[in-house]
Amino acid sequence: MNATNCIFCKIIADEVPAVKVYENEHILAFLDITPINPGHTLIIPKEHHENMFELPEALTLEMMRAVKKISHGIKDGLSEPGMNIIMNNGVAAGQTVFHAHIHLIPRKNGDGHAMWKGGKYSEGEAEKVARAIIAALEVETEKVPLKETSAGRRAEGSESPAGLYASLF
């Protein structure tokens, strides 16, 4: 799907109506037309990107700032004790509108919406999975130059993923 036939792009362009709750230069938030609970809100970037994997980092940060702000508005405005913050990325994860979006779903005890049931790792599986993720993070880290301090050490926040997690193995 491209921006010309994207329902969210049409909402941004005011070609399709939506009940908007927040808007700034980069972000739009509106009530979901098929809410899980009242107040179920979608936060979208105004720029068309299919999912989290395509979002530029700066826009991802803008979305998360909006999540923080709007989630407080929902919680305080509707007096809801809990909230699910969810982003489905890809068909396998349940994404049905291919414009990046985050769901803010107000929750209360006994609302009838159960969460998925977790499983267990088999012997050695967790470590194998962690190593695969760490290896991929190292490849990603190599794409971005590391920050150096005046003492020649890595700047805080730029640690090697393997170094951060070496104690796991």
Image (spheres, rainbow, N blue to C red):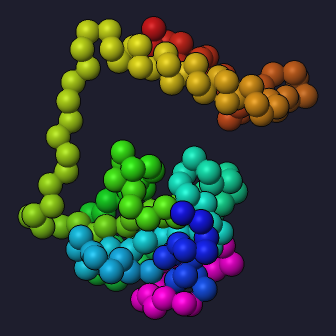
Stretch in magenta: 14-29
Closer to the camera in the image, 84 or 18:
18
Residue 49 position (above or below residue 69): above
| Quarter-of-image position of residue 62 | bottom right
Task: Where is residue 9? Give x, y as percent.
Answer: 57, 76
Q: Quadrant of the C terminus?
A: top left
Residue 76 position (above or below residue 136): below
Residue drawn 53% across the image and 72% down it:
6
Task: Where is residue 28? Give x, y as percent.
Answer: 55, 77
Closer to the camera in the image, 105 or 18:
18
Residue 26 is a magenta residue: yes
Residue 60 is a magenta residue: no
Q: Quadrant of the N terminus?
A: bottom right
Closer to the camera in the image, 1 or 119:
1
Apparent side of residue 59 relative to residue 53 in the rendered image (left or right)? right
Residue drawn 32% across the image and 9% down it:
124
| Quarter-of-image position of residue 63 | bottom right
Residue drawn 42% across the image and 89% down it:
19
Residue 147 position (above or below residue 65): above
Apparent side of residue 121 relative to residue 91 in the rendered image (left or right)? left
